[in-house]
Image: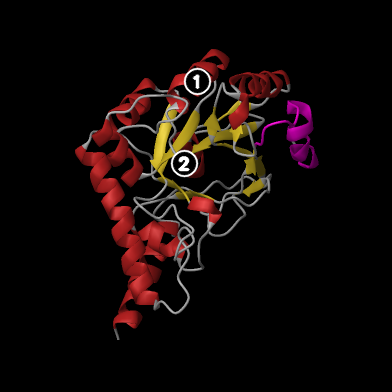
Amino acid sequence: MKKRVLTLLLTLTLSLALSPQSRAVRTEAAPVFLPVVMYHHVSKNPKKWNDYVISPEELAADLDYLADQGWHSVSVKELLDWYDGRGTLPEKPFMITFDDGFESTMAYAAPILASHGFQGVVAVIGSVCEKFSACGEHDPELSNLSWEDAAALAEDGVFEVQCHTWDMHSLSGRRGCQQRRGESDCDYAAHLAADLARFRSACDSHGVRTVPAIAYPYGAYSPETDQIALAQGFRLAFTCEEQVNILPDQPPPLLRLGRFNRPHGAGSAQFFSKWKETPNG
């Protein structure tokens, strides 16, 4: 009975959120192709460079290349305004995301993005912000953002702050936001909803202004995840599936946006050649 009631509530929430009365849907026939690049840590130490850690010089070279090719970064707010019919997107839009909330995002990445006139969104893990707020450690090569850092970064305007869950960034027991084997739908929904609610509550209490977006840890999610996230107020979700997003045609709208992970070593032109398959590439 509980499972049936929960399913009905989630379905109703999803239906209301996606109904024509709830938003002004973009009606143009031409689709929008939106690639998203996923960064993690930026380090000046060559010993740390790997598939998820790049140098500041590589980041700057990437943004130089994208600017030269006529790409324009868009924020979560701009994308949602466009989707709701309140704004427009540039001719060649793309998004910049940083996962895990490393302090290097503030120390190294933010000035580089600002110098190019680009915006990005950083996904922070609530429990990790809590840990580094308590220990007071500040080292862009080692630390993660504290709550104070995250709040300052959101106010600075170069980066928006989004959810990377409160404490589901793990491969032990549960893989990211996926439902565990043998876990009931009701228990899974309750666990994920509680985690996301705790993240939002902590951000509110620490004055961290967030956008209604989430990056699923490890890109891991289940078929029910979209509805649960939507019921918690999230309107946009990033996965780790390497694909250029076609908007607004992908169902459910904006809740399964693919991204391209940027590893160390590849030249900018080589890496972004993955986007050449799109009509606006």
Give the residue type at disc 2: Leu
Residue visible at 45% across and 56% down in the picture = 20
Q: Nearer the viewer, mark 2 or mark 1?
A: 1
Question: In the displayed image of the protein, which residue is found farthest to the front?
Answer: 47
Residue visible at 36% across and 52% down in the picture = 167
Give the residue type at disc 1: Tyr
- Residue 161 falls left or right of residue 65: left
User: What's the distance in space between the residues labelled 2 and 1, CA to CA?
Assistant: 27 Å
Query: Quadrant location of the C terminus?
Result: top right
Which residue is the site of mark 1? Answer: 108
Compared to residue 92, the image places residue 256 above or below, namely below
Q: Is residue 274 magenta?
A: yes
Return the x and y of residue 258 as percentages of the image width and height.
61, 49
Which residue is the site of mark 2? Answer: 80
**Magenta stretch in the rendered image:** 262-279
- Residue 114 falls left or right of residue 165: right
